[in-house]
Amino acid sequence: MRPSKHHARGTRGLLGALLTALAALAALLTVAPAAHADTTICEQYGSTTIQDRYVVQNNRWGTGDTQCITVTDSGFRLTQADGSVPTNGAPKSYPSVFNGCHYTNCSPGTRLPARLGTISTAPTSISYSYVSNAVYDAAYDIWLDPTPRTDGVNRTEIMVWFNKVGSIQPVGSQVGTATVAGRTWQVWSGNNGSNDVLSFVAPSAITSWSFDVMDFVRQAVSRGLAQDSWYLTSVQAGFEPWQNGAGLAVNSFSSTVETGSGGSGTPAACKVAYATNVWQGGFTADVTVTNTGSSPVSDWKLAFALPTGQRITSAWGAGVTPSAGAVTASGLFYNAQIAPGGQVTFGFQGSYAGTFAKPAGFSLNGTACTTG
């Protein structure tokens, strides 16, 4: 018996619907990557990689008590953080995620170590989750060394404290305040017996932020704690717990390094002339930057610190930010490159309180300049 036309039409419809559903399922399986199970690490110095770009490390170096981290696709969280250490000493660990090299462990595809004078920008971003039942800081570790070493302790450590809970403080003593990357920080300086430490402490907690690592590196250069011929070896972000710490998390992290600001890989060489016209409570400054090197300097950035009480009200020939403290002047579209032996000039008007003074020094794309 042959099926009726109605029955045959219904069968073909069901088959078509089934084939369509199977095709959609196949497409879904092709486009959507398989979910990755979180990885738990309890080994003292255990580590793994995420996104084929970064290393996540447990790094329990200051205690024998158990510490475990659960590594996600985008960061990690502390799931166990037993024990405590005195708050007037070193922390018990630094669980963290990093780009670069740390004790011979290098992240996949990293451009680090890189000579400071050849780095044009090093953008990074972070998102943290905090807890209140622990003593800790949430901080970046930025490591600098005279050599491109990938093992051991570097010469200078820059710490950027996003948050601190409890009676803890950075290495050394507070030496002042500074405005860096548009934020105001307490500045601490000291030595922990192995390396110099320059720390920037936020006055209130920062949960997420995007910034340029080189803004803080230039601070180290301007304070004599690094030179343009040195190397950036790693950019790390995590936590230093003293007591407990379970629940702390890095939700997301990114770090890249762009090189080539000094022309064909040659560190910039520069001279700065700073001419002023000063009256009661106000002043103008005309700044001339000369490239004394043999290679062009592209996307130039001149960093300097305005003395206390000075504030910029307007500028020309460059973008100058922020208006006070540690400022950076950046070239505009028509003068972004300085040829070998060439010059670029910009200026600004400002106000001041107290006694007028000129900036103590200048650095061009991370390179200290002579003045005259």
Image: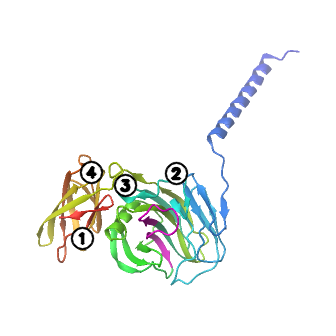
Q: Write down the quadrant of residue 211 in the picture.
A: bottom left
Which numbered tag is attached to residue 294?
A: 4
Which residue position holds label 3? 118
Q: Residues within 10 Å of mark 1 (few under 14, many from 20)?
A: few
Q: Between marks 4 and 3, how big is the CA–CA gap?
A: 14 Å
Amino acid type, label 4: Ser
Q: Between marks 3 and 1, how big is the CA–CA gap?
A: 24 Å
User: Nearer the observer, disc 4 or disc 2?
Assistant: 4
Sequence-earlier tag: 1 or 2: 2
Q: Between marks 4 and 1, how big is the CA–CA gap?
A: 26 Å
Picture coordinates of residue 61 (x, y %)?
Answer: 59, 73
Amino acid type, label 2: Gly
Q: Considering the image in quadrants, where does the N terminus appear?
A: top right
Picture coordinates of residue 70 (x, y %)?
Answer: 64, 63
Picture coordinates of residue 101 (x, y %)?
Answer: 52, 60
**149 to the left or right of 28:** left
User: Nearer the observer, disc 3 or disc 1?
Assistant: 3
Sequence-earlier tag: 3 or 1: 3
Disc 4 + disc 3, Cβ < 8 Å = no
Q: Considering the image in quadrants, where does the C terminus appear?
A: bottom left
Q: Between marks 1 and 2, how big is the CA–CA gap?
A: 38 Å
Q: Nearer the viewer, residue 22 or 148?
A: 148
Which numbered tag is attached to residue 372?
A: none
Which residue position holds label 1? 360
Sequence-earlier tag: 4 or 2: 2
Q: Residue at x 24, y 50 (%)?
A: 340
Amino acid type, label 3: Thr
Q: Nearer the viewer, residue 304 or 139?
A: 304
Q: Write down the quadrant of residue 188 in the picture.
A: bottom left
Q: Which segment is the magenta one? A: 142-165
Disc 4 + disc 1, Cβ < 8 Å = no
Secondary element at image label 3: helix
